Image (cartoon, helix red, strand yellow):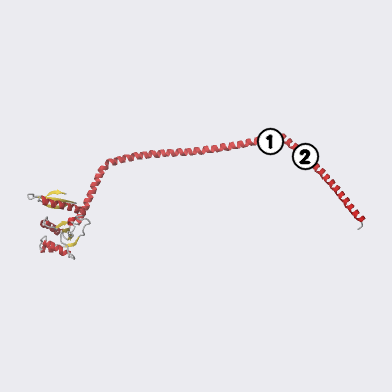
């Protein structure tokens, strides 16, 4: 390329850059001026606004204050009315409740008075019962004793045709009817004709009691016989008292309830001591619901009661 042309291009580029810088400077200055104008306008507007606000507050402050005071007064009146109304409601409710409580108290007082009257009446009844209790107790004991005696008498009556035979030797596989017949013939010495007339309803050996006197622990078990006729029972008992009383280990006794049987066993022991020490005759009798021991001396005509 020719030198002249190169120079021309360099100059043109330099001239273009100079013009471009000047243009930018002008644009920046214009923007700056525009921004300053906008800032001035914003400050002016703010000042105007502040002046306007100050003017409104100062002129209407009284009205606003009066409005606020009026509203507060209305609220205060409303609260006061509601509080007063609620208080009146509470007073009314409390009066009703107080009346109810008073009525309940009156009812309780009346109930207490009635209970006091009842207590006084019960105390009088208790006092009367306490006064009559010993007599009633004695009467009750007498009635109980009479009932017990009646029961014993009935049980004795149910056993009136029974006899107990003690001391008869016990054999294995024995015929109890034959044992009783042999006892009547040999021990009581009844005639064969009389023994043939005696009819037995039942006969068997009794079980040994749970408690037994050591002296009679090995003794044979007793035989109980039930006779059909009462006269035969009385005949056997009378003959046994004459033949066996105190002279043999065997004996014949009437069948008694357990309580009387125990008492009779005690009297039998006493009778043995009387016969041994005093040489008196003894007999044991069943009188109603009791058992008696009677004694008789050689010169005595009647039997005398010794123990019961």
Residue 270, percent from left and from top = 15, 51
Residue that protrudes farthest toward the front in the picture: 3
What residue appears at the point 43 percent right and 38 percent down from the top-left corner? 105
Looking at the image, residue 157 lies above or below residue 82? below
Residue 198 placed where, x, y %?
A: 14, 62
Residue 199 to residue 147: above or below: below
Mark 2 — residue? 43
Residue at left offset 24%, top offset 46%: 141
Percent of width and height locating residue 12 = 89, 52
Give left or right: position of 217 versus 94. Answer: left
Residue 197 seen: no
In what element is the residue under mark 2? helix
- Using the rendered image of the protein, determine whether residue 6 is visible from the camera's viewpoint: yes
| Mark positioned earlier in the residue sequence (1 or 2) | 2
Horizontal placement of 5 versus 204: left or right?
right
Which of the labelled discs sits on residue 64, or is there none? Answer: 1
């Amino acid at each position: 390329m020719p030198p002249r042309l190169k120079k021309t291009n360099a100059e043109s580029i330099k001239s273009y850059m100079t013009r471009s810088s000047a243009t930018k400077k002008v644009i920046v200055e214009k923007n700056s001026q525009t921004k300053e104008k906008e800032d001035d306008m914003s400050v002016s507007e703010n000042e105007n606004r502040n002046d306007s606000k100050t003017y409104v507050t100062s002129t209407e402050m009284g009205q606003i204050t009066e409005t606020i005071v009026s509203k507060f007064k209305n609220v205060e009146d409303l609260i006061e009315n509601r509080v007063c109304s609620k208080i009146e409601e509470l007073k009314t409710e409390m009066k009703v409740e107080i009346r109810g409580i008073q009525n309940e108290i009156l009812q309780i007082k009346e109930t207490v008075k009635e209970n006091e009257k009842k207590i006084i009446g019960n105390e009088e009844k208790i006092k009367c019962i306490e006064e009559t209790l010993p007599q009633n107790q004695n009467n009750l004991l007498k009635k109980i004793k009479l009932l017990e005696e009646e029961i014993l008498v009935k049980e004795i009556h149910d056993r009136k045709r029974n006899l107990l035979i003690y001391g008869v030797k016990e054999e294995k596989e024995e015929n109890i009817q034959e044992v009783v017949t042999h006892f009547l013939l040999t021990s009581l010495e009844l005639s064969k004709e009389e023994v043939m007339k005696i009819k037995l309803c039942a006969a068997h050996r009794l079980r040994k009691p749970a408690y037994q006197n050591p002296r009679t622990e090995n003794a044979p078990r007793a035989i109980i016989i039930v006779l059909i006729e009462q006269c035969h029972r009385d005949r056997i008992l009378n003959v046994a008292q004459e033949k066996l009383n105190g002279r043999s280990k065997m004996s014949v006794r009437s069948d008694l309830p357990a309580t009387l049987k125990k008492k009779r066993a005690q009297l039998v022991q006493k009778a043995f001591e009387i016969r041994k020490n005093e040489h008196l005759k003894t007999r044991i009798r069943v009188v109603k619901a009791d058992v008696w021991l009677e004694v008789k001396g050689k010169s005595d005509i009647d039997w005398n009661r010794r123990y019961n």
